[in-house]
Amino acid sequence: MLITGGKVLLPNKDEPALLDIRSKNGKIVEIGESIQGDDEVIDADGCIVLPGAIDAHTHFDDPGYTHREDFYHGSSASAAGGITTIIDMPCTSIPPVTDLENFQNKLEHIKKKSIVDYGLFGGVSADSFDEHFPHNMTELAPYILGFKTYFTSGMKAFPRLTHWQFEQVLKQAIELRVPVLVHSEDFDYIDSATRWAKQMGNEPYHYYLSRPEITEILAVQNIVDILDNVMQTIHFPDDFKPVHIVHITTGNAVERITDKPITCESCPHYLAFDLEDFKKIGSPLKVTPVIKSPGNREKLWKYIIDGKIDFVASDHAPASYQEKHTGSIWTDYSGIPGTGTLLPFIFSEGYLSGRISLRRLVEIVSEMPAKRYGIYDRKGSIQLGKDADLVIIDPNAKWKVIGNNFLSKGKITPFEGMEFGGRIVKTILRGKVIYDYQNGIEIPAVFRNLITRD
């Protein structure tokens, strides 16, 4: 395949250059001007060519909760949004991926469904924390990209860890050189506040009161203190950061991990909306952690710009109409479809709006998640020898978000009706077009890869 006429952003470059890209056997083999040959040609005239995006936080619910989402529909939505690799969470599968047998069960269910390449996280919950958990973690480590844990969990099948349990998991993960991901909300605060807030009412504001900013700040501070304690006795290389905080929502929490061996991610919905929007939109914007009060999203943007937030992921977690509209904010499902709007939102509201450079955009949607999870040797940038994972974007086109057009099973989005600048024209996985704006999903004869650490 030969892509011609597009403006290509190469690593460590601030501006794209008019270059051609040739791929062969799924790899990038030539980058230059006016490349000649008899390859299949894709004309990218007027478009920007970027490395395929990586969504490092999805819940594709397969197997077990496939009435909400499955790997085919979820990964189709990813491809339509310019994403060529996803990393799926262990907790919204039945059984959850807490040991090698459960991992193999999940892999058997999904390996022929995905439209994009995929990696998997393992995890440790209170249910799986027993005398076998170090062995289970050791067996899983070669196949997964991180271990997911919760300080607060609403899932009966994946209950939270206590602080002591988390410390033991962290010690084992450091020995294995695999990062621990943490859902960071303080259980004690939420447990008490929820009982009080439910008595106060049934509006989005009351749900916010059950888990406001302080719940994240307390949890993050506890993570920092536990890690500091572990580091007194266990040493690891300076380039290994053992903890990753998922879907961070408050600037004050980000400040507490600065200069610590901890990374973090945020999500488009925390960059787009605040509590006043949640009050208006209601359940279509109900997520956990909750949307926060005004002022936080501006801080999050600032920390994305200066690199204190490492990357952005979707936390894609859709649900059926009935689960999203139960009649109570307390029982309405918490989660939204997001993998298909991740890159379009950042391109439109980050790059085109002037908040971030194109170089920083590529860092937060491709390069940094690839580096964090040990797959940068294959993914995350346009370089010779790497997978030919590319997205072609028309920066001059505009389009309106319509949930019913999503390829995901989830159709209920808080971005409904918003206009984004920049249209995904084609998504290319290892040298094959998997999504075309005019033709939709294309399924070439290419196996999707399970991605593991280098």
Image (cartoon, grey):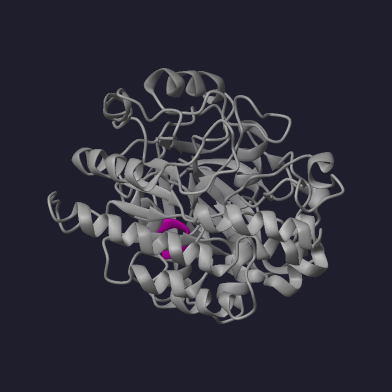
Residue 55, x across and y down, in percent: 51, 50
Question: On the image, which quarter does residue 383 sit in?
Answer: bottom left
Q: Bounds of the magenta span?
A: 363-367
**Number of on-image labels:** 0
Residue 111 part of the magenta segment? no
Question: On the image, which quarter does residue 64 sit in?
Answer: top right
- Residue 254 sits above or below residue 314 on the image: below
Identify the residue at image location x=47%, y=43%.
Answer: 38
Identify the residue at image location x=53%, y=38%.
Answer: 116
Residue 364 part of the magenta segment? yes
Residue 367, x across and y down, in percent: 38, 58
| Dominant secondary structure (helix, strand or loop) of the stretch shown in magenta | helix
Residue 70, x across and y down, in percent: 65, 32
Residue 103 visible from this viewpoint: yes
Identify the residue at image location x=49%, y=18%.
Answer: 105
For the C terminus, the image quarter is: top left
Q: In the picture provided, is 164 more to the left or to the right than 417?
A: left
For this rendering, which residue is in front, 411 or 299?
299
For this rendering, which residue is in front, 93 or 11?
93
Residue found at the very far right of the displayed protein? 327
For this rendering, which residue is in front, 433 or 334?
334
Residue 212, x across and y down, in percent: 60, 66
Q: In the picture provided, is 188 more to the left or to the right than 257?
A: right
For this rendering, which residue is in front, 246 or 450?
246
- Residue 166 sits above or below residue 250 on the image: above
Residue 393 visible from this viewpoint: no
